[in-house]
Amino acid sequence: MVKMLNNYLKINFCLLLIIFSPFVQSAETLLTKITPVRNAPEFSLQDLDGNIVKLSDFRGKPLIVNFWATWCPPCRKEMPSMERAWQIIKDQGIAMVAINVGEDEDTVFTFTADYPLSFPLLLDTTGSVTQRWPVVGLPTTFIVNPEGKIVYRAIGEREWDMPELLNVIRQLKK
């Protein structure tokens, strides 16, 4: 009887794996490789502390560039995973910024009361920087290689602290 039950459980477990395997996402399905690679458009934006941050400040290291807004539910949902990812990668020679699209400093600052974030939040209040990047919708995230070229894009929400995603980014380090 126990042997039959074990076999039954094994068969059902295997069936579940087969049924749900299409829903298991790998880094290759979560990040779209950009071909041909292209230069990331330069930006010079203010952060919440009033500092000017430029794309060129990150030359020589992989950079995650996220475009988002406080009113965007998928953006709000992915921000905690971005913070967790930042805590993992911040000392590994990988940079991250989130560029807020079209909102003012007070709105973004208020957002951080509910979503504490320690990586740079940049303000594109006019949307002029966003227009120069191939942003399709929000959130859209780009992975820029150390040479300043866009190599991957993710449209929509992701769990940025997934080891599979972070390993793809780590592989870009010189």
Image (cartoon, rainbow, N blue to C red):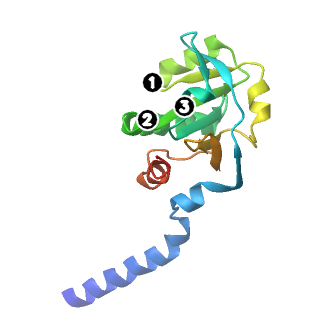
Categorize mark 3 by other alpha carbons within 10 Å: few (<14), some (14-19), many (20+): some
Where residue 10 sits, quadrant-wise, is bottom left
Of the pair 95 and 14, the residue shown nearer to us = 95
Residue type at mark 3 is: Phe
Measured as percent of width and height from the top left, residue 58 is found at 54, 31
Could you tell me how far apart the alpha carbons at marks 1 and 3 are, in whole angstroms?
Answer: 17 Å
Q: Secondary structure at mark 2?
A: helix
Q: Amino acid at mark 1?
A: Ser
Q: Nearer the viewer, residue 17 or 116?
A: 116
x, y percentage for residue 17?
Answer: 44, 74
* Residue lying at 55% horizontally and 47% vertically, measured from the top left: 158
How packed mark 2 is, by other alpha carbons closer than 10 Å (few <14, some 14-19, many 20 or more), is many
Secondary structure beneath label 3: helix
Is the Cβ of the residue at disc 2 closer than 8 Å to that at disc 1? yes
Q: Which residue is mark 1?
A: 118
Residue highlighted by disc 2: 86
Residue 103 placement, left or right of 87: right
Task: Give the Cα distance between marks 2 and 1.
Answer: 8 Å
Seen in the picture, residue 128 relative to 163 is either above or below; the reply is: above
Q: How many marks?
A: 3
Number of other residues with Cα within 10 Å of mark 1, as a class: few under 14, some 14 to 19, many 20 or more: few
Residue at (58% x, 56% y) in the render: 30
**Circle 2: residue type:** Trp
Q: Is residue 55 above or below residue 3?
A: above
Residue under circle 3?
58
